[in-house]
Image (cartoon, helix red, strand yellow):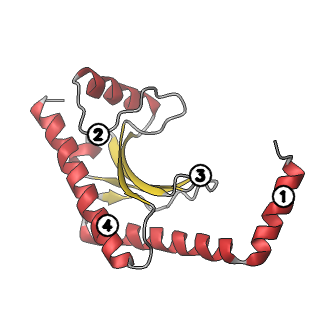
Amino acid sequence: MVSFHESMLEYKAQLQKGIIQNAYRGLMEYMGSLRSHFKSKYPDYAVTGNIYFGYMDMTYFALNPPFLKTRKLRVALVFLHEEFRFEVWLAGYNKSIQKKYWDMIRKNGWEKYRIPSSLEGIDSIIEHILVENPDFRDLDALTRHFDRGIMKFIEDVEDFFEQRAL
């Protein structure tokens, strides 16, 4: 295992190249533009004011469609840095809400989306991969893809709850 000191030397070397800063800045700017896109296109959704930048593990922001907001649920667009993919998650406002709905969904046998096998260290109730290894050359096309994927995810979640009166 590499020591903290050796890791920091490698970190310094990579930073001196300048590529990581450029990529990270571009990703954060794109996440900000995605947040703005959803906020302006879906004014009925409460879109979080801040982006969670993370520790280079994940970066996300949340949308709160009215139907889910009344249940203290939200939808998050998440970029997982190491996996290099974007996912959409259903999440609760807190751990007790998360557990309540995670139990309900598991009990009702929904198999459309991935349900974590445990909530230990997990922030999602259900998850769906939107894009693996995204192509950042056409951000408008990527944004349209996210828009369609997230709206379909929200529709599916709302339909699931309505059909089961949850």
Examine the image and state in which quarter residue 164 appears: top left
Q: For residue 152, which numbered disc appears in the image?
A: none
**Tag 4 residue:** 38
Q: Position of residue 159 (x, y in %)?
A: 14, 41
Please state which of the two labelled residues, at mark 4 or mark 3, is closer to the viewer. Answer: 3
The local secondary structure at tag 1 comes to: helix
Give the residue displayed 46% in from the left and 31% down from the top.
95
Q: Amino acid at mark 2?
A: Tyr
Q: Amino acid at mark 4?
A: Phe
Q: Do the residues under discs 1 and 4 have CB atoms within 8 angstroms?
A: no
Q: Amino acid at mark 1?
A: Met
Give the residue displayed 86% in from the left and 61% down from the top.
9
**Tag 2 residue:** 113
**Tag 3 residue:** 57
Disc with the residue nearer the chain's start (2 vs 1): 1
Q: How many marks?
A: 4
Q: Between residues 26 and 101, which one lies in front from this camera angle?
A: 26
Residue 75 position (above or below residue 113): below
